[in-house]
Image (spheres, helix red, strand yellow):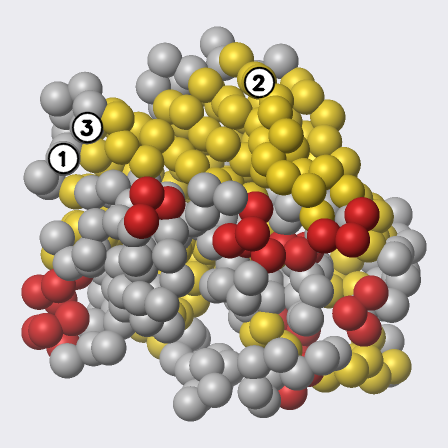
Amino acid sequence: MASVTRAVFGELPSGGGTVEKFQLQSDLLRVDIISWGCTITALEVKDRQGRSSDVVLGFAELEGYLQKQPYFGAVIGRVANRIAKGTFKVDGKEYHLAINKEPNSLHGGVRGFDKVLWTPRVLSNGIQFSRISPDGEEGYPGELKVWVTYTLDGGELVVNYRAQASQATPVNLTNHSYFNLAGQGSPNIYDHEVTIEADTYLPVDETLIPTGEVAPVQGTAFDLRKPVELGKHLQDFHLNGFDHNFCLKGSKEKHFCARVHHAASGRVLEVYTTQPGVQFYMGNFLDGTLKGKNGAVYPKHSGFCLETQNWPDAVNQPRFPPVLLRPGEEYDHTTWFKFSVA
């Protein structure tokens, strides 16, 4: 069983409303989630000695989340990842989005789902957030009703995303938590062992838009089907870091996505999802300028993201899995983050 407690986290400037924090606690995990961006602000998990550490990057106060920062812990929408040149067509009509990461649109635009206040509803073992994204918000067509539900079950945090549209629109929702299983504030993730269950990945151009090719991982740096230690792997392949979509099983059922093991603490994170892809990102753009929880700084490669999602720029790539949600349909995806020790 899990318990849920709620508290005020902070006030938005100029009467923008009250941001609340919901603490979900089981015998194995403690998770703090705020109503601003459905953001996971803390996630405490025990190591093999039974010592708890917070394993997600973030801020202790609301002000941290309101500054320019790289989506720590937030839900991303209406469309996660990049849309080439911020344009797409639906049923012959062209739509234009804000170019907020030159020359593309990234993570829903200037004010995506991460930068809005959601309406909370407390559940027996979790919290459900909802909002209505109005027609034309950030340039996207149609009104979109969205529900994001976090539930806790022992060592497992389950995130479910649902949405309904008033007209055809691309939808791709994910969570952008940055993890460090040694504990947030640890200088890097080079001692983490990563496995990703993907036979193919998406090569990208210099603006990080997929080229359209679905490339086999076999014989490349992207073959993570057997565990690799990140630091050594980057050295062996002369990589700056990962920021790529790995193609998972095409099934809508729950399937294994990734496993990360931190040998020193014994902590293990396993990710399962119904999504067709996962963006594995190593915090390449972190630069140590942000001050995080407990005086932590977050340099390059001090956290990793496993953003379960549809493939980037799918709205412009007919060979990628379908990303359009039409009236009468329901978007419904779930991701499971399972923590244990080994």
195 or 52: nearer the viewer = 52
Give the percent coordinates (x, y) of residue 198.
Answer: 34, 58
Query: Can residue 202 be seen in this snapshot?
Result: yes
For badge 1, the amino acid type reads Ser
Q: Residue placed at 44% from the left, 88% from the top?
A: 205
Quadrant location, the C terminus: top left
What is the spatial separation of the Cα atoms under label 2 and label 1, in whole angstroms?
28 Å
Q: Is residue 138 left or right of residue 276?
A: right
Q: Residue placed at 59% from the left, 73% from the top?
A: 106
Sequence-first tag of 3 and 2: 2
165 or 266: nearer the viewer = 266
The residue carrying pointer 1 sits among few (fewer than 14), some (14 to 19) or many (20 or more) residues within 10 Å by Cα, namely some
Image disc number at residue 265: 1
What is the spatial separation of the Cα atoms under label 3 and label 2, in whole angstroms?
24 Å
Query: Can residue 198 be seen in this snapshot?
Result: no
For disc 2, the marked residue is: 5
For disc 3, the marked residue is: 47
For badge 2, the amino acid type reads Thr
Image disc number at residue 66: none
